[in-house]
Image (cartoon, helix red, strand yellow):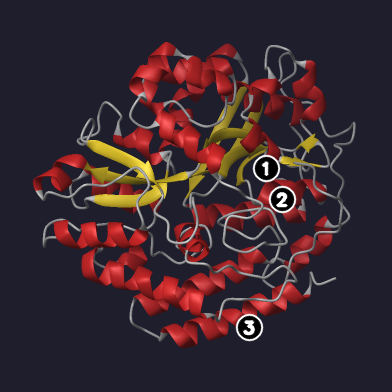
Amino acid sequence: MRRTKRALTFGAGALASALALAACSSGNVSSDSGSGGGDGENVTLNLATVNNGQMKDMEKLKSEYEDANPGTTVNFQVMEEGDLRAAVTADVASGAGQYDIVTIGAYETPQWGANGWLVDLTPDLEADSSYDVDDLLPPVRDVNTYDDKLYAVPFYGESSILMYNKEVLDKAGVTIGENPTWQEVAAAAKQVNTKKMAGICMRGKPGWGDLFAPLTTVVQTFGGNWYDNDWNATVDTPQWKQAITFYKTMLDDSGEADPVSYSFNECLTALKEGKAAMWADASVAASMLEADDSPVKGKMGYAHMPVVETQESGWLWSWNLAIPSSTKQQDAALKFVKWATSKEYIELVGNEIGWSNVPPGSRTSTYEIPEYKEAAAAYAPITLDVMSSVNPKQPGVDPQPWVGIQYVSIPEFQDVGNQCAQLVADYIANRTSVDDALGKCQSLAQKAGDAHKG
């Protein structure tokens, strides 16, 4: 996907001064930036990453890389999703150089690449035939491209799917089809809900990448969206109100206690421990539910994300490794990034940790490995099907002026999404009304949309 060049500036917020400094930075690392990792040179690479299972596996396996590259130490700094975004954005935008490698999402990559905050990886990756850059899955390669330049490479890619405990639902006489509606899922959740087991677990923790990741897709399939095609905010609308009210009612009737404390990791644990029967979230979770050490391995069923007015409602996302332009260890950082996103790394994870733990959705060749096809038979086909079926250009009912599903690809969205997520979380927790939450969010969204009109 080729994106047209245009100035990308962040909205008001705590990062304004850092971003002002970054506006003068260049995406090309100067010749005196230091190669790092040269003969006899000791190098420490600082890698900021998210607290997800796949990244923890990478940290476990880093000794394999360090042993093969004497003198190089990779220091992992693992953070929760919201903390990671705040720390990495501040560092990369200001050019402070605290991190040599950063884990960023599909939302950040094209914007940061356009701003010159990231190293263009294209020449080195295309020159290395052993890396096989063409093997990267096209959807996730596209979302990491700006102006035909690859500014990050996918560590894993995902959509979102419905995951459910077949034993629990079968016992209650509940059947889930391959393409359920949200109304069907809510009814099923209510039927299997007990004092000991929630019928469904859903994210409620404030944050544009927490609560609003699944909730935006719910809004879109109910017929709403953040903006119309002219950048007029459309938050304070009947479609939003219907979607948000539905989400809260489902959680009130059948969800986990205190949903505003739950995001990805909490719902994953709830499903594993038998404290929740269903969960609609990132497809990558399926690999963790089917891992050899998972208590629910072999007990799970998987379906497309529930819909209302659209054919699909899954998102499209990838967690990626990128190199900030401010690093003084560019060569060493690039070498590690290539290793961690290579075919060989996929094989290493399969052999050392387990084939169900292999990072999904990043390489075409992964889905041709016999051991992976066997281990991931329950969820790999549906993951690929959903990733291939969603439409990031128009995921909802009406056209939109940006490319993206569970986010709006404008710099201001990080701040707007976080503030609006807090407002909606307050509604879920009965601290405010839906009208008050959406009214305030409408004003925030419109201010951001005004900057992009015309």
Q: Residue 84's spot in the image, x, y percent?
A: 55, 52
Q: CA distance from mark 2 to mark 3?
A: 29 Å
Tell me where residue 452 appears, x and y as whole percent: 79, 69
Q: Earlier in the sequence, mark 2 or mark 1?
A: 2
| 227 or 213, nearer to the observer | 227
Identify residue type, mark 3: Ser
Q: Which residue is mark 3?
A: 443
Residue 261 horizontal/vertical position (percent):
34, 64
Q: Which residue is mark 2?
A: 92
Left or right of residue 219: residue 126:
right
Q: Look at the numbered disc 1 and give the secondary structure of its residue.
A: helix
| 2 or 1: mark nearer the eye | 1
Mark closer to the chain start, 1 or 3: 1
User: Can you say which quadrant of the picture contains the C terminus?
Assistant: bottom right
Viewer-proximal residue among 350 and 44: 350
Task: Compare residues 418 and 221 and report the one nearer the observer.
Answer: 221
Give left or right: position of 242 versus 108: left
Other residues around mark 2 within 10 Å, as few (<14) / some (14–19) / many (≥20): many
Please say if 6 is above or below 150: below
Q: Is residue 77 left or right of residue 431?
A: right
> Residue at (26%, 72%) from the top-left corner?
252
Tell which tag, 2 or 3, sits nearer the viewer.
3
| Quadrant location of the N terminus in the rendered image | top right
Whether 238 is drawn above or below 28: the answer is: below
As helix, strand or loop, the secondary structure at mark 3 comes to helix
Residue 87 falls in which quadrant of the image? Answer: bottom right
Label drawn at residue 210: none
Residue under label 1: 143
Task: Tell me the kind of residue under disc 2.
Answer: Val
